[in-house]
Amino acid sequence: MTERNDLNYTQSDVIAEIYRRLQDNISRFQTITNRPLTLSEKVLIGHLDHEVGPDLENNLARGKSYVLLRPDRVALQDVTGQMTLLQFMQTGLQHTKVPTTVHCDHLIQARVEGDQDTRAALHENSEVYQFLESASRKYGIGFWKPGAGIIHQVVLENYAFPGGLMIGTDSHTPNAGGLGMLAIGVGGLDAAEVMAGLPWELLYPKRIGVLLTGALNGWTSPKDIILHVASILTVAGGTNSIIEYFGPGCTTLSCTGKATITNMGAEIGATTSIFPYDRKMGEYLVATGRSEIAELANRHFNMLQQDPEIEREILRNRENSTKYFDQLIELNLSELEPYIVGPHTPDLARPVSRMASDVRRNGYVNEISVALIGSCTNSSYEDMSRAADVAEQANARGLKTRIPLQVTPGSEMIRTTIERDGQMDLLKRIGANVLANACGPCIGQWQRSELKTGVPNSIVTSYNRNFPGRNDGRRETMNFITSPEMVIALALGGKLSFNPLKDELVASDGSLFRLEPPKVAPEIPNLGFAYVADTFVAPASDPENIKVIIGKDSDRLQELESFPAWDGRDFEDLAILAKVAGKCTTDHISPAGAWLMYRGHLDKISDNLLLGAVNSFNGKIGVGKNVFNNQIASFPEIARTYLNQGIKWIIIGDMNYGEGSSREHAAMSPRYLGCVAVIARSFARIHETNLKKQGVLATTFANKSDFEKVREDDRVSIHGLSRLEPGKPLKCLLHHGNQGIETIWLQHSYNAAQIEWFKMGSALNIIRNRKT
């Protein structure tokens, strides 16, 4: 197993105390409500910051009420963690109040192969790693070195536990839901506040129940479950909801298979996803050196599952689900087919059997350019074993992949184990190249020297996200997502239209053969997981002697200055920097790729503002019109011009604005460059919160069709800010030049505390003031 030494947090006595608190709160709440509870209800109620009293249920309106919670843990990765630590340093505290870890997984670029790429990253990012490690050692934070693994895999192997509540500065933090934990992606300031000992505020989520029956068979895998669910809910269908899986089908899935499913709940906008505790989770805990926690979970089994009456009621009559869930999805795993989704969105799904017809109908590039497996979503021992099974079939017939195959292990523990047990060798024999234990091609950290810019191409991956430009910075690359074993099969076929369920391959001797579905794979290695050393740095025993390292003339790190407080006046005659059309994710607002290196330097990274956004006025990407001189320029150039001239400006967003990653730079950069408000048709949850936290007024059109009324040269005024109240709409004036003024109305979701964030200029300013 991997070494662990984070403040002894995973010791059973600490978890036992958490369980005592949960049990007490849950018992009180059930006495008050006298009804069965779902699992997510139990975990949320168990982590409330305030006492469970008689009036509590009246203040838990799903999708409307805000609750204050006490998370058990915070997880940071090396990119978003830079800004989180810089913000935490502004609080003036000397030690985190909640166990926290930093994981160095995003800055390693995929170029050649794992060892070489990791060495290059250590050199290129040395000052960032020195900052992260020194800050971690000083403030009581566990530090996982570059190469140790991807944050979510390492958390699952070391820190996740059933019934816990964790927040993390990465949208795929819900991966830990595979181990029965409520794990939620947040912005960096949310994390910094919790690290500083403040309660964490959450819009009390709606609940979507997914009832699983039957069992997977043949080519189908846990990945196909979430791809199918995404096709039903779409990228926004889970917004402000917890996806709660239950039913007899759950117990047939491995712990890591469940994590694959909860990981990709981020792709449907869900707050998080969770599975009930079961025997398979207990086995995983034992296999990863946490037998005492497994014993504790076994003793609290009923607390870590929904009350059994709920399942019985729903199985008896599906209409009973409305008492517990806002929506019910039922899925018979025995009837599920293998799925493939994409391109450009994770909810464009079809069974693999329909892929060939979709290729013809939509004109997709049929020839696959690269196949990639692994990532935080699909690099478990089980995943790699099933992929290796397909590779072994090909190797026995003298076949190699027709295209390049890249393998990204999720952690050093997994990489070492599959090297020991032979899966890695089987993959290499058919042509696989092994990349670093890092995010790499999944997040745009992929240097593709073999492909000319502008060439349309198709890739297949077992990753989780496939927005245009997401993987290699090229919008013309079409990413199709499926399971690892299906990726291997498609790599052998070489074409999207290849259907492994019925199409044949040609062996080296000229004979035809069909791939067999991979055998049922072991979830836990027979020899146990391999032990890995020297991947973790514990907090310093003498933190007062540790100095946080930030170079004086660094172009990678920049200490933060406070954003100014609201001046108490309405917004008048605001310029429109951008009106974006269609899907605008945080990848579009603050692109990654080469820009990742500046995540600790707010000024430099602000030069990527909206470079991936589509301008609704001209259809172009990343450019707009300076309305004061009519010159066409990039959005960040225009924003800096406005800033230098003292001109306040706004962004107009479309549906689900800010979908995707939790990166708070998508909110900080606009704020830094002078944005005072964003008006959208609707927001993705994390981005809306990030805007609020940074002091940007986040509002939506009361009438979504009013989006069409906004013109390029309009000036926008927002009135009623001095009377900003929860639930009270704001008046907005669109000044159409010589064509008069049009009045529309704006809605918002601010509560009383969030209004103070706006007035003070940011939530961080409130923390600073409390400190002083």
Image (tube, grey):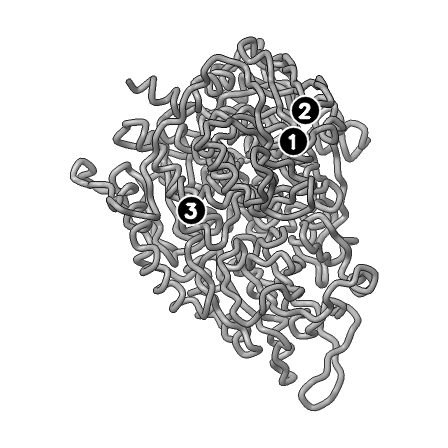
Front-most of residues 110 and 323: 110
How far is the residue under mark 1 from the one under mark 2?
A: 8 Å
Front-most of residues 733 and 45: 733
Instruction: Name the spot of residue 402 as percent of width and height, x first.
Output: 64, 77
* Residue displayed at 65% across by 50% down: 252
Q: Which residue is mark 3?
A: 79
Q: Which residue is mark 1?
A: 713
Circle nearer the N terminus (3, 1): 3
The amino acid on which the numbered mark 2 sits, given as a three-letter code, is Gly
Which SS class for mark 1?
Answer: loop
The amino acid on which the numbered mark 3 sits, given as a three-letter code, is Val
How far is the residue under mark 3 from the one under mark 1?
A: 37 Å
Discs 3/1, front: 1
Q: Residue furthest left?
A: 545
Relative to 396, residue 758 above or below = above
Q: Which residue is mark 2?
A: 737
Instruction: Name the spot of residue 645 as percent of width and height, x first.
Output: 46, 30
How many numbered badges does the structure rendering display? 3
- Left or right for 576, reference 436: right
Which SS class for mark 2?
Answer: helix
Which SS class for mark 3?
Answer: loop
Circle nearer the N terminus (2, 3): 3
Relative to 487, residue 464 above or below = above
Q: Quadrant of the N terminus?
A: bottom left
Discs 2/3, front: 2
Residue 703 tag number: none
Check disc 1: other Cα within 10 Å, few if <14, some if 14-19, many if 20+.
some
